[in-house]
Image (cartoon, rainbow, N blue to C red):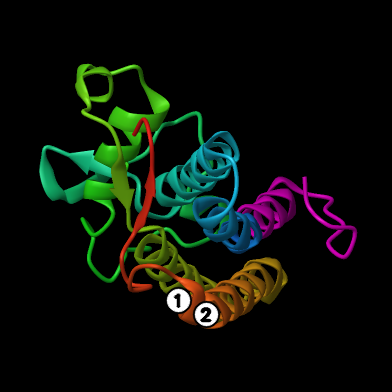
Amino acid sequence: MYDDEFRATSDAERLSGSLYCHLRMLGELVPYMVEFDKDGPTILANACLESFLTHARLLIEFIAGRKKGNPMLRKYSDLDFQPSTLGLVDWKLTVPNYFDGYLDLIDKHVAHLSRERVRSDGARWWAFDQMAKGLLFEYERFADCLVTEGTPQYAIPIKTGVIRAEEIISSTLQSDVPHFSRPISAPISVGGF
């Protein structure tokens, strides 16, 4: 699931290596989403966007959980890894409900065959760059907290995934600005969502 540079022997090490992979995929998919949105087949643009959103959903659920009644209260599945798996029992996002809107949209338009998805009148705009920016910011904070708590071995793969994703996204969006037919801050439009 992750590169050879991170060999894992414990669940915590496997988890940090898996987070590296999912963070890196956020970055790796952006050039393809941008390219296929401009010049490629819609089916490939959709596939890349769906993959991006699946990785984003996984990363959001790990680091933020889901709202529990009050949007500031969070819940995690007992079956899933949580920040406490890596020793961060009191972990909280900068803004606890920041990703709730993204999760709701991903659930309704990608992860489930919802009424909203079926009734959609065509293209949905996804602010993938803003979603990635928020996730990478929070995961960098998360890695810094791991170092502070004395577990840098778990922070290294996460921080590396953040750095690689940021480099790829930054390079892609900067190099494609002159070629974009709309402002780069505008989210990607993919038919069917």
- Residues 160 and 13: in front is 160
Q: Residue at position x 83%, y 57% from top?
A: 3
Is 82 drawn above or below residue 157 in the view shown? Answer: above
Instruction: Locate residue 6, reporting x and y percent.
Output: 83, 62
Image quarter of the C terminus: top left
* Quarter of the image that includes the N terminus: top right
Q: Residue at x 65, y 67 (%)?
A: 161
Between marks 2 and 1, how big is the CA–CA gap? 5 Å
Label at residue 141: 1
Is 45 located above or below residue 177 in the figure? above
Q: In this view, does 179 lie to the left or right of 7?
A: left
**Label 1 residue SS:** helix
Residue 151 visible in this rendered orientation of the protein: no
Query: Which region shows up in magenta?
Result: 1-22
Q: Where does the image place residue 113, in percent across and percent down from the top left?
A: 34, 17
Q: 140 or 165: which is nearer to us?
A: 165
Place residue 185 in its image quadrant: bottom left
Q: What residue type is labelled 1?
A: Arg
- Which circle marks residue 144 in the picture? 2
Q: Position of residue 156 (x, y in %)?
A: 70, 73
The outermost residue toward the left is 70
- Secondary structure type for disc 2: helix
- 121 lies left or right of 174: left
Let me know if residue 37 is in the magenta part: no
Find residue 97 and report its horizontal and vertical position in percent.
21, 55
Kindly check if marks 2 and 1 are in contact, taking CB atoms under 8 A apart as contact: yes
